[in-house]
Amino acid sequence: MRIITKVLSVFCCAALLTVSMPVQAAAAETEKTPSGVKITDIQKTIEDYAEQNKSDYACFSAAVFDRNGILYANGFGDAGGGQKADASTVYEWGSVSKTMVWVSALQLYEQGKLDLEADVRGYLPEGFFQHLRYDDKITMLNLMNHTGGWCENTWSIQTPNTGDIVSLHDALRNSEPYQLYRPGEMSSYCNWGAALAGYVVECISGEDYCDYVHKHILEPLGMEETAVNPTHSDNEWVKEQREKLECYNPAGDNWVSAGKQLIYINLYPAGAVTSSITDMAKYGQAFLAEKCPLFEKQETLDLLLTQSAELPGTDIAYCYHGFWDTDYKTTKTYGHDGGTNGCSSVFQFDPVSGIGVAAMTSGGGAALEKMTELIYGEQEMPDTKDLGGDIKKHEDISGLYHGVRSILHGPMRWMGIAGVLPILPAGADSFNVVGIATIDRISDDVLRLNQNGYQIPLVVRNLSDGGRMMTLGEQSYISKTENMVGMAGLIVLVLFTVISAVMLFVKLILLIAKKRKKFIGRGIMTLAQLARLASVGVLIWFSSIYGIYYGLPKLQGMIGVGIQALCLLIYVLAVCTDLRGLFSKSEEKAGAGKYLINLIANGGSIFAVVALELIRFWGV
């Protein structure tokens, strides 16, 4: 019977692809959406937008749903091979997949099998963690709120090769990031932590996470056009459709093909769900149904939509047991958004109006944001009237900040250091974020970031161990001396590498002209200049790998670290040679100025490698 059902499903979806007709429900409980659009006008509103704003997208599908089902679902643009996108075009959910982890966790909580405030070590194999800095307990709430204390992954969490996919246990062990911060101290969006929560579900239930989701989420909701496994092997129809999907990159007002972008996520609970927009709408409708089919008790759904994390020192919520909220002028929604190498998604529902929106695209663009705006209206900043009085003078918050989510440990540390966010003073209690946004104070504790009319509250706090922390929603930024040292190292390395490249070119000209003179240390000086090129080359190489693997594969990472270690050895030898030449009495030595300049360059290179590669990596 299961096979017959799948065959019929494929046949129906094929028919839907052929006629490309929108999916509509017969009736709705309300007459209008929160934005004021009549329910009967939803189709026209969305289709008019799609027709009049084709530069906003290459391919996307959208659905609007209520407590009773899907009100409208359709697709627009080229899904690949000239095939028009529609309601059965499949896309990757990206981080919207995490919401299934949180639902699964609350199902186990409801059954009394999971304590949200217990240390997850109690559910994991003994000695599971390898890189914890603190002994503090890490709870499921920490994982839901992204406050486990981990920085971004150094080691790869995805791959273009299906043969590289390993068990969830092994994938987590292979890519465990370093815990830089005490659990609960600051928020840092964490794919690894979400996948860890999926593994906790696996350990408690005794079921493979993929099997668990199929049994306890997909099957109860009738989601037959959804795959959870990273290779889509759990749904052959989805696998076939995803392999047809074309992905796109923006090129001015146009879009160009980026190929299939079939990248497989090893930490799959964090972002590998793939489905049609109709299945995403079925999932969203479950949270609006009179009795949520995902939970036995209404209290569990109520708990899910209760705030679980706030900006430090305020009551401004940013997380609801793994779900995010969005404030609009007329309502408030819950949900998540997501992105992979090839797709982007947004998923929101409003329990008050009973209206939800789902949208996915294979090329990014403004279409996703526009879908939520069409249904919910304009966004606005959360109410902060109870958080303080008039704007008052406060200490200067300007400085150079780095995202906590950045890679701030290991051989990719320089990427986090390069991602600096300068905040400059711009008047009394107002600041400028490098021309892209402004910050002003609305109370003693709370500030407001303004970017192109969009406003978000933020809080700044001094850290107990020095430095300053700025928190915006689920992401914190820090300003600390050790990161400034790393940034100085990056600047030094780039500067001396440029100088070395020029000097090597000059040496080549002199060599060709046979005018290059011999002197003590000439060879090691040239070798050190080549090493600087190699050091920067490793950084560039790492960047190209990172875009594909979202981290470094262990082999490439170790090769790169080995090259940097060899370069460091060359710099040390060059410093010794520079000192020897500087104090030598031999007539074959060069001028003291040449040795002094090279001594500075090689000493600076040693500093750069240590600052970029060794701080926190070897415990320096």
Image: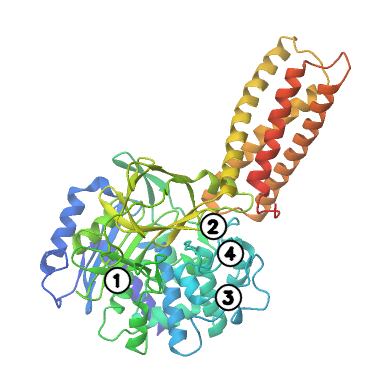
Element on which disc 2 rests: loop
Q: Earlier in the sequence, mark 4 or mark 2?
A: 2
**What is the distance, in whole Å, between disc 4 and disc 1 at their CAs?**
29 Å
Could you say where residue 124 lies in the image, as x and y percent from the top left?
61, 78
Report the quarter where the N terminus lies: bottom left
**Badge 2 amino acid:** Glu
Q: Which residue, given by chain and number where applicable, does mark 3 sit on? A: 137
Q: Residue shown at 55%/74% (left/top)?
A: 138
Q: Residues within 10 Å of mark 4 (few under 14, many from 20)?
A: many
**Picture layout, residue 517 above or below residue 468:** above
Q: Which residue, given by chain and number where applicable, does mark 4 sit on? A: 165
Element on which disc 3 rests: loop
**What is the distance, in whole Å, between disc 2 and disc 3 at their CAs?**
20 Å
Element on which disc 1 rests: helix
Q: How is the image coloured?
A: rainbow
**What is the distance, in whole Å, between disc 1 and disc 3 at their CAs?**
37 Å
Which of the two residues, 216 or 175, is positioned nearer the viewer here?
Answer: 175
